[in-house]
Image (tube, helix red, strand yellow):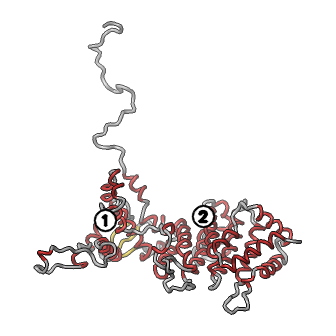
Amino acid sequence: MATPTLDQFLTEINRITLSKDSAQLSQYLVIEPPYAPSYTTIINELRATYPKGGDSDAALEKKIVKAVKVIDGGDDVEVASWSAFSRFMVLYFGFLRDVDVGNLLETFGLLSEVLQKANSALQNQTHGTTILDTVISYSRMFARLAMGLDKKPELIAHLATTTSSSSDDSGPRETLPERAANIIRYAFVACLNDRSGSSPTGIGPNGTPQGKRKGTYVLANLCLKILFACRKTRGAAQIFENIFVLSPPLSAYPKAQRYIAKGDLVGFRRHLDIGSEHYAWFSGYRLDLQLRNRCEVFVWRSICRKTFVLYGDPGNPEARKAPTFDLKDVLAIFRWQETIYATSPGASQPDNYIDPDFVGVVDEPIGEDALDLPDMNNIHSKMTALIHQGLLGGYISFSREKFAIQGAKLKGALAAGFPNAWKTVEARADDEVPGWKLETTGPAFGGGVVRLSGARPVGLS
């Protein structure tokens, strides 16, 4: 049976892959319903000519290989083949043909297979960048679907039963969100390890990431969103470590991809400084002092949290070993940030002004020696304040200079050690304000004595 719409679609895919237009390929390889009329026509042609089962997939792959020239490469040795793309396209068309959007679990399984094949196509050193936007688009849908299913245990209860009966007791079973995060992680690693750009740093002349490294933070954030949702902090810590070692600088990426809480003490203070471009707005609404004096403590909390995520010991609750992080690391971060804050933007050394009349009179300390940098006592004080305010859950081991998180076995290390800041503040709030007399809600004169000695008859003046 003739498939004119499918043939035209493959002709366009051939043109796009030869031009290596990643954005346009993503626009063509639509996977999320509702579908446009042209895609509905393609689905009908697939069901009629290449139905599910039998040798249909093999015949469909031959058609794809014949139409898309980049799959087999060319006579030129510089044009490498891209065989993984044909297998991906077969599963893509199979998804369109077989998906039942009313069956979320089946949709998850089909999309899982499609995304894994897309990851394989992404690995290609020559053509992988072409499918990057498609992988990111599919990963977003896959993450939403996985977390949505995780909130509906009645739909996945039989998976837990099947997994438990078919596996041994060697370790905890992989949950559905974890499976999704691991599949997306393959794409993240492929982007992180990409060396296809002209620069060894992965940053192009215009200051933006090159090649597949463009997708590093988008895919990392999707993985982190899933892992934090299911409280798998060890996997999240591994992603942070990989980014720290291999990724280009965060500043090279769009601001929308930099939303991970950093504990940026320097940025917080400079944003609220009197010389800041935003200070007039804060001052106009009388917010400057409240934010500067009351909110820096939340930045301290973020520094501690980021220290644990990057360098902390996740512990072993089953062996009664609490998660910990080293206060020496926290001290190093605070000292470094205080030094940066004392250095004017663009300068390489902290500002240490000396009056000309006193130059040479006394050997003035310079650089870090002239700064009043925090020591371990300051860190103890800050940590104790955070614990007292309920913003940290745990205790300080002064002998080992570590902070230990309590309650990780029940809540998870991040949830137990770093409670939600707003809920903590709200729980400590008191409705009673000194000097404010609230209106009583009881009946008038309730329990009081009414004196009628001076009362007059009604109607008399």
Q: State the SS at label 2.
A: helix
* Quarter of the figure with residue 446: top left
Q: In this figure, which residue is indicated by the disc labeled 2?
A: 147
Nearer to us in this view, 132 or 388: 132
On the rendered structure, is 107 left or right of 146? right
Q: Secondary structure at mark 1?
A: helix
Relative to 193, does residue 342 appear above or below in the rendering? above
Q: Position of residue 80 (x, y in %)?
A: 68, 88
Amino acid under disc 2: Met
Q: Nearer the viewer, residue 53 or 215?
A: 215
Give yes or no for contact between labels 2 and 1 (Cβ–Cβ under 8 Å). Answer: no
Give the Cα distance between marks 2 and 1. 36 Å
Query: Where, quadrant-wise, is the C terminus in this rendering?
Result: top left
Which tag is nearer the camera, tag 2 or tag 1?
A: 2
Give coordinates of residue 109: x percent, y percent.
Answer: 70, 70
Give the side of residue 39 with respect to residue 19, left or right. right
Q: Inspect this view and state whether residue 397 appears.
A: no
Q: Residue at x 43, y 74 (%)?
A: 321
Q: Residue at x 75, y 80 (%)?
A: 68
Among the 4 quarters of the image, the one containing residue 94? bottom right
* Crowd tier of the residue under label 2, counting other residues whose Cα lies within 10 Å: few below 14, some 14–19, many 20 or above: some
85 and 262: which one is in front?
A: 85
Q: Is residue 73 visible?
A: yes
Where residue 320 appears, as percent x and y from the top left, is: 44, 73
The residue that label 1 is drawn on is: 384
Residue lying farthest to the right in this orientation: 1
Callout count: 2
